[in-house]
Image (spheres, rainbow, N blue to C red):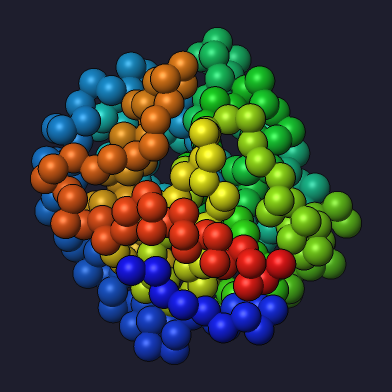
């Protein structure tokens, strides 16, 4: 069932309960992930074929935050890489050029396009590098990323983001991110989100569903998405999806209970969110 929204022109921050319980829920997800990752990788073993995947961290995070997800990708046969750019403070010249440099390096190593995964703010950067380098990025997967954000109130991390605004490139000011939400990608885009996200309002994560774009709902916290079994299942499934016959995500039978939304519900949720903030 799609939740109703008031048409106020903006979306409120995530519920305070979700925000205050983020650390506890994220810890529980990490514990569950550690005990389940072997079974998860067994089900997706061999799908990577040595392909290179670049994983971008969220705001105020670094490569340590993506270690669990990259570990699962490596066990499934992918060559998963951190960005090696330190703490993510947003779209500075050093970070944008650094990401493109990492893409250049990985493409040169493999001789073929790479996949990019971004968590939270890292997802916005992943979408951006896919636009800048469409020939070098074959798909984008985001985790709790406000790709459809239209107002600062939609994220409880906005104040932290603004601390670094003076270092951000003018072309990537907040208003530019808002404008970019209407731009689609040439590559497949999967936005993974949770209605219980305590940092980013879940409706700001929704992209317009289309032939090469989709929204997949999981149960979990924002800070635990990088160690969320259902989210990892989606990531592995989407990485293995053939580009020449790309189809929307459908969970395997063993994981269906971990996915509360249906493709139809996600499409309706996007439509309602879009009309309320446009």
Numbered disc total:
0
Residue located farthest toward the top when viewing the structure as drawn:
111
170 left or right, relative to 266: right
The C terminus lies in quadrant: bottom right
Along the line of sight, the residue nearer the viewer: 75 or 152: 152
91 left or right, relative to 196: right
Does the rendering let one see residue 59? no
The quarter of the displayed image where residue 261 is located: bottom left
Residue located 64% across and 48% down the image: 125
Residue located 62% across and 22% down the image: 136
100 left or right, relative to 191: right
Q: Is residue 254 above or below residue 101?
A: below
Residue located 45% across and 50% down the image: 215
Residue 200 appears at what percent x and percent y?
52, 71
Q: Is residue 127 above or below residue 259?
A: above
Residue located 16% across and 57% down the image: 257
Residue 264 appears at what percent x and percent y?
38, 52
Does the rendering let one see residue 41? yes
Residue 238 appears at what percent x and percent y?
38, 34
Residue 104 appears at what percent x and percent y?
65, 24
The N terminus lies in quadrant: bottom left
């Amino acid at each position: 069932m799609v939740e109703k929204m008031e048409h106020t022109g903006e979306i409120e921050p995530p519920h305070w309960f979700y925000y205050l319980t983020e650390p506890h829920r994220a810890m529980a997800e990490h514990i569950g992930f550690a005990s389940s990752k072997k079974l998860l990788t067994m089900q997706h073993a061999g799908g990577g074929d040595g392909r290179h995947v670049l994983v971008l961290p969220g705001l105020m995070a670094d490569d340590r935050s993506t270690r669990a997800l990259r570990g699962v990708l490596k066990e499934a046969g992918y060559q998963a890489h951190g960005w090696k750019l330190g703490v993510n403070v947003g779209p500075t010249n050093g970070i944008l050029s650094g990401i493109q440099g990492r893409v250049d390096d990985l493409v040169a190593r493999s001789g073929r396009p790479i996949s990019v995964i971004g968590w939270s703010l890292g997802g916005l950067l992943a979408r951006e590098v896919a636009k800048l380098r469409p020939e070098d990025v074959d798909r984008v997967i985001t985790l709790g990323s406000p790709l459809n954000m239209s107002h600062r109130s939609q994220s409880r991390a906005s104040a932290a983001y603004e601390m670094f605004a003076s270092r951000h490139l003018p072309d990537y000011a907040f208003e530019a991110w808002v404008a970019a939400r209407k731009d689609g990608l040439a590559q497949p885009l999967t936005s993974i989100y949770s209605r219980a996200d305590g940092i980013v309002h879940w409706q700001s994560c929704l992209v317009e569903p289309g032939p090469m774009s989709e929204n997949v709902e999981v149960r979990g916290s924002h800070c635990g998405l990088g160690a969320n079994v259902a989210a990892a299942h989606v990531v592995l499934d989407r990485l293995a999806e053939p580009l020449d016959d790309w189809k929307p995500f459908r969970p395997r039978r063993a994981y269906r209970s971990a996915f509360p939304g249906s493709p139809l519900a996600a499409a309706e949720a996007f439509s309602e969110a879009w009309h309320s903030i446009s």
